[in-house]
Image (cartoon, rainbow, N blue to C red):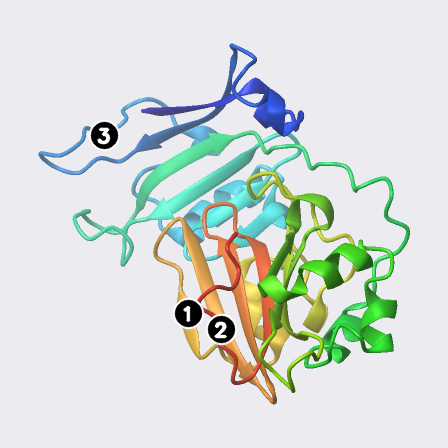
Amino acid sequence: MLFSFSERNYWNGRSIASHGKSGELIFTNVAVTAGIPDVMRRYEGDLLFGLQWEDDRTTARERLATAGFGDSLHAGRRDAWWLPDYRIRLTYQAGCIKQAGACGIFDISLGIPMHPLACAPATREYPSAEQVLSVLGRSTNDPDFQVAFRDLGLASLMAEASSEVVDRADEHGFILYFDSRQGVPGSHPVCTGISFVRDRLGNSRAWAGPLPFGLQFDDPPSILEERMDQRASRWLDEGTFGSARWSLPGLQVSVNFDSLDNCLESVRVIVEGHRTSNCQPRG
């Protein structure tokens, strides 16, 4: 068995200055495993919802559906069910755990989700996804850029744009990327990309406006390609966190997702032809 804990002030979304100072830990998750011979022992107790270690994906889903949670499934390489107060996650053996045995469940974890942080009180209105995408490739002096971000600290965004990465994830759930080398000397930096960030990635607050391409932060990885209306050019989902990438006309789109809870963590859109090595430091 594996038990997980989190410091109380961080878990409850208290101020950053208070993190690590509560002197208390909150019990947040427990995981049990089917075991690996000569490596770890199998958990021999009763499993939740009548699950058995020998259950395949179809059988496990049927058991959760019988328990009344069929509509709570967030599907991916693993399966996660978002119950009213808990999340249950299953990792399956076939193709997932290189040293595991026959087809079945490899591990089961049950945990409580963190509460989201409230939106920044000074924010009046978030721009639409179409409005944001339309200003990619435009300078900070462009009227449309200024209208899009007028309620999201426009003056400081313009002042910091020459640094090329302006992180407002903690305040408003986004990160902007700029190219200060475009144009002639003395020209304004050009906005080349944006990351839309969900809440609680470190100390981030969620982007409270709509996401592009009809995406939602709570979307499971299994419906990403349907949302994007094409197959991903790259797909990685074997670890705790996964990512997918699409090449669209004039744009590179990258989605990072949590492959345990099966939800989106961030969506990055970059103008084609620009470097992404310094992009998306979170998620």
Kindly identify the residue that appears in the image at 80 percent across and 75 percent down.
141
Q: Give neighbour class at mark 1: few <14, some 14-19, many 20+ (Cα, 10 Å).
A: some
Kindly indicate whether the residue at mark 3 contacts the one at mark 1 (C-beta within 8 angstroms): no
On the image, which quarter does residue 176 sit in?
bottom right
Distance in Å between CA atoms under marks 1 and 3 = 31 Å
What residue type is disc 3 on? Arg
Say if 132 sits above or below 239 in the image. Answer: below
- Which element is circle 2 on? strand
Rendered location of residue 228, percent (x, y): 61, 76
- Which element is circle 3 on? loop
What residue type is disc 2 on? Arg
- Of callouts 1 and 3, which one flags the residue occurring earlier in the amino acid sequence? 3
Give the residue at mark 1: 235
Give the residue at mark 3: 42
Residue 245, numbered circle: 2
Residue 213, numbered circle: none
Q: Give neighbour class at mark 2: few <14, some 14-19, many 20+ (Cα, 10 Å).
A: many
Say if 83 sits above or below 217 in the image. Answer: above
